[in-house]
Structure formats: C-alpha cells, structure tokens
Amino acid sequence: MVWYLHELVPGAVRVAVLVSPADTANTKSTLEEVQAAAAGMGLQIEVLNADNSGAINAAFEKIESLRPDALFVAASPFLTGRYAQLIQLAAFHRLPASYALREIAEAGGLMSYRTDIADAYRQIGIYAGLCRGSVCSWIELFSNLAVQTPGQLFFRSRPCK
C-alpha cells in the first residue's frame, strides 16, 4: 500500500499515516504493514490519530508543521465517512494522499489501493455458479479456484492547469 504511494512520489522520505484509534484491529494491522514496508524503503513514518472531525483538523495542523512528503489514510469506517474533509485538506496542503477506497479517488482523492468491491461480488457470483445444481463442499470449490490478487490500483486523473 505505502509502496505505491512511494512510487508515485519517489522523493518521499517522510510519510504521515492517518489512522482512527477507535478501529483498533484495523489500525494495529495497518500500522504493522506500513512500518514494515517503510523500514524496507527507508521511509520515516509519522502516525496521526483522528476519531472525530476536530481531530482530523488537528492532524492536518500537525501535518503543516511536520511537512511530510505524502499522506497515507488508513481504511476505517470513520475516515472513509469523512472522505470529503480529507480530500479537501490534502488538496489545500498540496499533499499527495492514498485512500482506502476507489470511490474516494473518484470523488477527488489522488489514488486508492484496495479490493474492488464490485469485482468481489462478481467473483462471488462465479463461485456460486460453480456449485449450482450440485452439493459442493468448500474444499472442492477452493481446490478448483485460481489464486487472484485482491487489490487494484486506481488513480484519479484530471488536466493540470
């Protein structure tokens, strides 16, 4: 996830990571992944917490003083719900940012890397079709499936002025 952001901003050294502390399980796993990837790329990570609208504003005030090269917004129900505020603040601070959902990039965010929900539902339909008309065990089903990469990279593009 952070790798794609680093590829987009190759000179990045400092990356701010915005997480929601209320989403403890996701925050923990995201930070473990980000810190492991950052160590391999020589990135400095600054973790910022936000669990309400005011905390998001405070995080961006801190971003102003930290001057990171990029922003990684972790997946969480709260942060996803505040995407308009996040997009606006990232644009105001001229900060390249990566978000959890394609819909956020489509709404004006720079990029996203996450599972495509529509494609996941399509795959479920294919899997269900494999079992139609017969009793199918999960072991039998999964032994006949191909391994697929679960994520897609999505960039929003618009003409520069």
Image: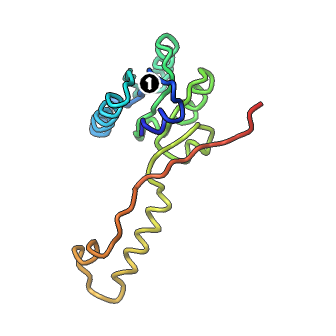
Query: Which image quarter holds the N terminus?
Result: top left
Q: Residue at x 42, y 28 (%)?
A: 18
Residue farthest to the right? 161
In the picture shown, does residue 45 fall above or below 116?
above
Callout 1, which amino acid? Answer: Val
Which residue is rendered at x = 40% and y = 80% of the image? 129
Toward the viewer: 114 or 132?
A: 114
Indicate left or right for 27 with 88 as reference. Answer: left
Instruction: Identify the image quadrant of the C terminus.
Output: top right
Q: Examine the rendered structure and indicate whether residue 122 appears above or below residue 50.
A: below
Question: The residue tagged with tag 1: helix, strand or loop?
Answer: strand
Q: Which residue is mark 1?
A: 15
- Residues 61 and 151: in front is 151
Counting from the top left corner in percent of width and height, residue 7 is at: 50, 35
The structure's colour scheme is: rainbow
Q: Residue at x 51, y 22 (%)?
A: 69
